[in-house]
Amino acid sequence: MRISRLIDKKKTALSFEIFPPKADMEIDIDGILNGLAGLKPDFISVTNSAGGNGATDGTLDIAEKIKNRYNTESIMHLVCSGASKQSIRDKLSAAYERGIDNILALRGDKANAEGSDFYYAEDLIKAIDGKKFCIGAAAYPEGHIDAPDLNTDLDYLKRKADCGVDFLTTQLCYDNNLLFKFRDLARKKGITAPILYGIMPVISKSQVSRMIFMCGVSLPGEIVKILYRYENNQEDLLKAGIDYAAKQINGLIQNGADGIHIYTMNKPDIAGRIVSRLDNLY
């Protein structure tokens, strides 16, 4: 089923994101999927690869398994950086033949763009048949790290959305005020697609430091205090991170969020602890 239809049916849609394991990782992917599917999300999103190299074979296999074995809708990430038009056509054809209805269209790592037939995500979106696929795209509440400012990034987002995007999923953000500001500015720009807010629970100081460096994410004072207070106590840090994520999501639900997208880091137990704390989601 097209994810846009699932969003239309729900007051607030719930989705999870997972990543395929690297070849040398010993991960029980079926155990992860079973745990997440048991939480009854509206869909599960599958990234390209744990290494970020744009590989999609594992992504497609897992997306198909989620849909057919675990009776949960799925969406496959598709990265265009470094890709040829023919390779994208081949991947879309394979996805369609295997019953995948939803594609999250992404640029990917700019460093891999040499020799690519695509430069921006909007170029990829134009290459996807909207009659065959529901198309999702990424949004950046604090502006993309490559953009000079949020307003400029919103102009690019409007261009991307106008190419045929059915819904948007945001990068992680720890401040609801920034998310509401982004939503209001996006609507003023004429961006009408439903917005699913991406939430990543704090589980370690190194994780947060990596996200700040990679994505340009800012930290509200409450998160800084959590990291300082519990930096030497992993169990209490995790509990505080889950408490914060649940509080943040409940605030989003109460303010009319179209959807919540939890970056699970392949940890269904953490996702379950968050979901158990949510109000009026189901």
Image (cartoon, rainbow, N blue to C red):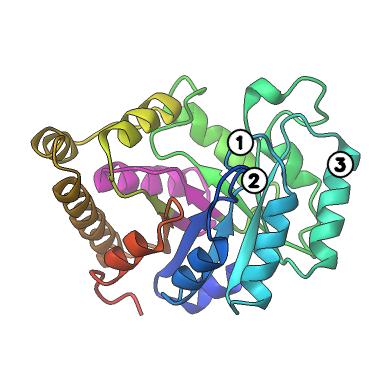
- What residue type is disc 3 on? Ser
For label 3, the SS is helix
Name the spot of residue 282 as percent of width and height, x first.
Answer: 36, 80
Of tags 1 and 3, which is closer to the observer? 1
Tell me which residue sits at (46%, 39%) in the image. 140
User: Label 3 belongs to which residue?
Assistant: 87
Instruction: Using residue 7 as the reference point, say whether residue 134 is left or right of it.
Output: right
Magenta residues, start to end? 168-196
- Can residue 97 be seen? yes
Query: Badge 2: few (under 14), some or many (20 or more) residues near its Cα, within 10 Å?
Result: many
Nearest the viewer among 229 and 199 is: 229
Name the spot of residue 78 as percent of width and height, x first.
Answer: 69, 47
Tell me which residue sits at (72%, 57%) in the image. 60
- What residue type is disc 2 on? Asn
CA separation, marks 2 and 1?
Answer: 7 Å
Q: How many labels does the image show?
A: 3
- What residue type is disc 1 on? Gly
